[in-house]
Amino acid sequence: MVLATKQAFDLIQQANFKQVDRVFTNNIPSDVGDDQTIILITDVLSKPDLYGNNHIITMDKQVEVQIFYTVDIDYDPDELESPLIELFDNAGWELKDVRGHTVDPDTSQMTATYYFQITNFL
């Protein structure tokens, strides 16, 4: 079975969003500046879901997808966010939560945070 962060990473990379400069899982390297739009994918949940004959047969997996926009953003964030939500939906992921837009206190970048969940069969 593939980690949910890897599944989400591959999905976003294959979509090749023109607004996204880089995609990372787990953490952002310290040398990445605020002049790029980046996506960070982290693991939130891995929970056995259905049991059949005392065996786990599915695993619910949830990821957090954070978008850190370049400080000099020159487009409407919906141009990236709406297609991103659609991408995950079409791939069988469920949108579980949206945290909206905030400003990162360390980089002054506008951010948006989404939570997506998928059920994988073992």
Image (cartoon, rainbow, N blue to C red):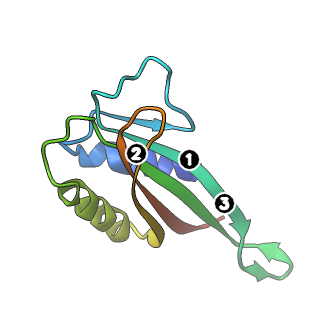
Q: Residue furthest right?
A: 54
Residue 76: quadrant of the picture: bottom left
Element marked by disc 2: helix
Look at the numbered discs 2 and 1 and tell me whether their residues touch, using CB distance below 8 Å. no
Q: Which numbered dot is residue 54?
A: none
Q: Which mark is residue 45?
A: 3
Question: Residue placed at 60% from the left, 51% from the top?
Answer: 43
**Residue visible at 22% across and 45% down in the picture:** 17
Q: Residue at x 30, y 59 (%)?
A: 84
Disc 3 versus disc 2: nearer the observer: 3
Q: Report if the CB atoms under discs 3 and 2 are less than 8 Å apart.
A: no
Residue 45: percent from left, percent from top: 66, 60
Location of mark 1 (residue):
42
Tag shown at residue 10: 2
Q: Residues within 10 Å of mark 2 (few under 14, many from 20)?
A: few
SS type, badge 3:
strand
Residue 32 % position (x, y)? 40, 22
Task: Say what amino acid the circle numbered 3 marks.
Answer: Leu
The answer to whether residue 63 is above or below residue 105 is below
Please name the amino acid that badge 2 sits on: Asp
x, y percent for residue 110: 34, 46
In percent of the image, x 38 and y 48: which residue is there?
Answer: 111
